[in-house]
Image (cartoon, rainbow, N blue to C red):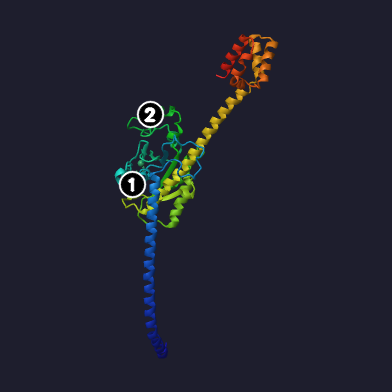
Amino acid sequence: MGPRSSKVKKVHGHEGDAAERGRKQAVEEFTESEKKRQQIQNAQRMSELKERVKREKAKLKSYTPGDMSGAGEFEDIDLSDINAVRIAVIGPAGCGKTCFINLAETILLGEDKVTAIPQSAAGEGSLYLLPHLSSLNFRLLDSRGFFSPGESYKEELIQILSGRIRDNEPIPRPNDTYGNHRHLRDVIAKRDVALLSDCIHGIISVLDYNDPKFMEYADEAKVYRRLLKENGYSTAAVVTYKTTEAITEEDRRYHQNEAAKAIGSSIDRTFSLLNHVALGTEITVETEMTIVDILKTALLGAESFIKVQKQLEKYKFEDEIRDILTEDQRISVVDFMTSLENKYAWTKAEVNNVIEIFDNNYIDTVQRLNQKWEEVEDKITPWTIKDLIKEELDELLL
Ligand SMILES: Nc1nc2c(ncn2[C@@H]2O[C@H](COP(=O)(O)OP(=O)(O)O)[C@@H](O)[C@H]2O)c(=O)[nH]1
Ligand SMILES: [Mg+2]
């Protein structure tokens, strides 16, 4: 570059300096106001989220079975026997079941009301089927973690779902060496399925992303997936994170997909959750919202399970009643009288006489005869026949 051009540049540079300063200032001012605007927006969003969490927590605390389903969903179904909706929290050992329940208790009831105490070491956690949130109208049941996704824990899960293993009871395993609970296995296996009110209605499945077996579970958990699906359960899935490292949105989505596939849940019923208990970090309002969403999802699934079971019960009952009625009504008075004619060797004339009386009084079935007995009994002769008819009728409709 020659001296001329440098001169031009210099002149230009002088003008440019002023313009540049102006531009810089404008940019700074804009950035500053944009920052403030975003801060205000964030603060607003945060206070809205806090309000929402507060409302949702209050709703869960006053929850009554049926609340999550739309109005009218339980119109013709009696829920009075369901004191509390029962949700089992299941998953591999150490995945964060107890920590999750601990978080739910902390945000709904407060730290001083927590009953779910997680294992801090790698050892086995809950060996009992422990109910939590017992002061509310739903329960979270902490269960014993499984160590492989294979067949071996299937029977145990069936016993929990069917209410054969009762609240606060040990969950016995064949190779348990401690506690001498093994004898309980036979006792539990012989029990009947519990009443609907004491069975498990909903499921929260937990998987720990940090678990080295995460992918193994994701591949092989189909035993549980099938079992739950076949029995009409709809599962809420939770992927827990025990790390303060930032997780990219892409990774999170990937884990969520894998967990949804493994558990047989849909993406919108699969949640990511930071394990604040294990990390020892403050529970954020976002985490509170996630826990609320998990509980709501699980309760909705549980309500639809209860609805289907109740409908099945109702149909079964109605079918039985219908069977009884049709069986009775199928017996015509003609058939009834003919059988008595043979049994007691009455004459045809005697029997026809009685049938004619019935006919004149619009009595065609034994049911009808029973209802109208007082109207016709005096017309039946001789009285020996009348008494035997009555005796046989009572016997038949007992
Ligand atoms: N460092 C530490 N780890 C914890 C603490 N509480 C739980 N953990 C870990 O967090 C994980 C989940 O624990 P937990 O909820 O008991 O799992 P569960 O077996 O599914 O009930 C396990 O790996 C625990 O070892 C804690 O207080 N400190
Ligand atoms: Mg546990």
Q: Secondary structure at mark 2?
A: helix
Q: In the rendered image of this protein, does residue 354 appear above or below residue 59?
A: above
Mark 2 and ligand 2: say if the CB distance to the nearest ligand atom is below 8 Å.
Answer: no
- Residue 10 is situated, as x and y percent measured from the top left of the image, at 38, 87
Neighbours of disc 2 within 10 Å: few (<14), some (14-19), many (20+): some
- Residue 119 is situated, as x and y percent measured from the top left of the image, at 32, 43
- Give the CA separation, mark 2 to mark 1: 33 Å
Q: Quadrant of ligand 1?
A: top left
Q: Secondary structure at mark 1?
A: helix
- Kindly identify which numbered label has been placed on residue 182: none
Neighbours of disc 1 within 10 Å: few (<14), some (14-19), many (20+): some
Quarter-of-image position of residue 100? top left
Q: Which residue is mark 1?
A: 106
Label pair 2/1, CB-CB below 8 angstroms: no
Q: Nearer the viewer, residue 113 or 163?
A: 113
Q: Which residue is mark 2?
A: 184
- Residue 23 is situated, as x and y percent measured from the top left of the image, at 39, 78
